[in-house]
């Protein structure tokens, strides 16, 4: 275990940039279509649920339901964009296209590759989450100054979910297994983390579960800023997201090294 871990570590603090740049150059050819795809689901939730249910629900936690939902969709879009980039784009680069194998013939290590992939997925999440936040500000559901405080939380959310998804990528035998991750982890978390309705509406058991979900910590960082409210437990939420970003990162490097060595 120790040897696997040491061999998979990044070689230095900057090699990952080459992997990030390679992914960026490939992505910019389809940037518009990619961005529209990442924005579709959150915008449908925002304007579909927001305007439809909003007329029936009224105000939630002393804010309009659409404004309440907008903050949840910012975090959700970051989660979705980084996850899908990792499981549906990084996986073929590792598996079918064997791009990782080619990179490993250079001075880069597996850790450099994984870190570059996570940084790129976090970048995609940052773009998607920021776009939703801008839409919310344009239509009056968030104050423009609040976006400056929301941006770091979006980036951290993207890195955390990319790191978690990289573990799934390391373990999945094929694409079909990604459906289980989406259905059994991401979708339930959407409804347990306060993205579409307050966590306080859940039973005590599910409220306790929500305390351990990364999306809940992200929403608790983003929503108070977008609704111009004082935020509590900021250090706790940031620390939890950092744990979700760092620990799966190291685990995925070990798992990926074992997989590539087979």
Image (tube, helix red, strand yellow):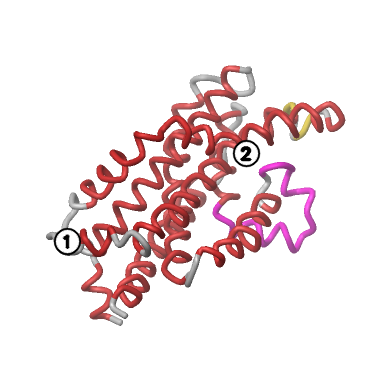
Residue ID at (18%, 49%): 14
Report the number of numbered marks.
2
Q: Earlier in the sequence, mark 1 or mark 2?
A: 1
- The reply, left or right, for residue 236 in relation to residue 6 is right
Q: Compared to 157, does 144 lie above or below?
A: above
Task: Kindly give the residue lying farthest to the front in the view shown.
Answer: 96
* Snapshot quadrant of residue 143: top right
Mark on residue 245? none
The residue that label 2 is drawn on is 41
Magenta-tinted stretch: 195-214
| Nearest-to-viewer mark from 1 and 2 | 2
At which x and y percent is residue 23? 31, 45
For the residues marked 1 and 2, what is the alpha-carbon distance in whole angstroms? Answer: 38 Å
Binning the other alpha carbons within 10 Å of mark 2 as few (below 14), some (14 to 19) or many (20 upward) gives some
| Disc sitting over residue 11 in the figure | 1
Instruction: Quarter of the image for the C terminus: give it.
Output: bottom left
Q: Residue at x 41, y 68 (%)?
A: 170
Helix, strand or loop under label 2: helix
Q: Considering depth in this image, is 48 or 130 the residue closer to the camera?
A: 48
Counting other residues with Cα less than 10 Å from the Cα at mark 1, is it few (<14), some (14-19), or many (20 or more)?
Answer: some
Magenta span contains residue 259:
no
- The x, y position of residue 197, in whole percent, is 74, 43
């Amino acid at each position: 275990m120790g040897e696997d871990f040491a061999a998979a570590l990044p070689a230095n603090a900057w090699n990952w940039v080459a992997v990030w740049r390679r992914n960026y150059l490939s992505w910019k050819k389809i940037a518009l279509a990619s961005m529209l795809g990442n924005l579709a689901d959150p915008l449908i939730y925002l304007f579909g649920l927001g305007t439809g249910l909003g007329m029936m629900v009224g105000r939630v936690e002393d804010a309009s339901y659409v404004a309440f939902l907008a903050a949840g969709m910012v975090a959700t879009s970051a989660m979705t964009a980084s996850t899908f980039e990792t499981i549906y784009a990084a996986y073929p680069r590792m598996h079918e296209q064997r791009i990782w194998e080619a990179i490993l013939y250079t001075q880069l290590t597996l850790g450099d590759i994984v870190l570059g992939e996570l940084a790129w997925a976090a970048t995609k999440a940052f773009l998607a989450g920021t776009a939703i936040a801008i839409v919310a500000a344009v239509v009056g559901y968030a104050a423009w100054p609040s976006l400056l405080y929301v941006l770091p939380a979006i980036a951290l959310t993207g890195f955390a979910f990319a790191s978690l998804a990289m573990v799934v990528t390391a373990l999945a035998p094929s694409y079909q297994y990604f459906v289980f991750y989406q259905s059994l982890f991401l979708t339930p978390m959407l409804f347990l983390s306060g993205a579409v309705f307050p966590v306080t509406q859940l039973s005590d058991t599910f409220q306790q579960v929500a305390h351990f979900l990364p999306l809940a910590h992200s929403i608790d960082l983003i929503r108070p800023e977008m609704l111009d409210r004082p935020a509590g437990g900021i250090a706790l939420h940031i620390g939890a997201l950092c744990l979700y970003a760092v620990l799966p990162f190291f685990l995925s490097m070990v798992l990926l090294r074992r997989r590539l060595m087979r």
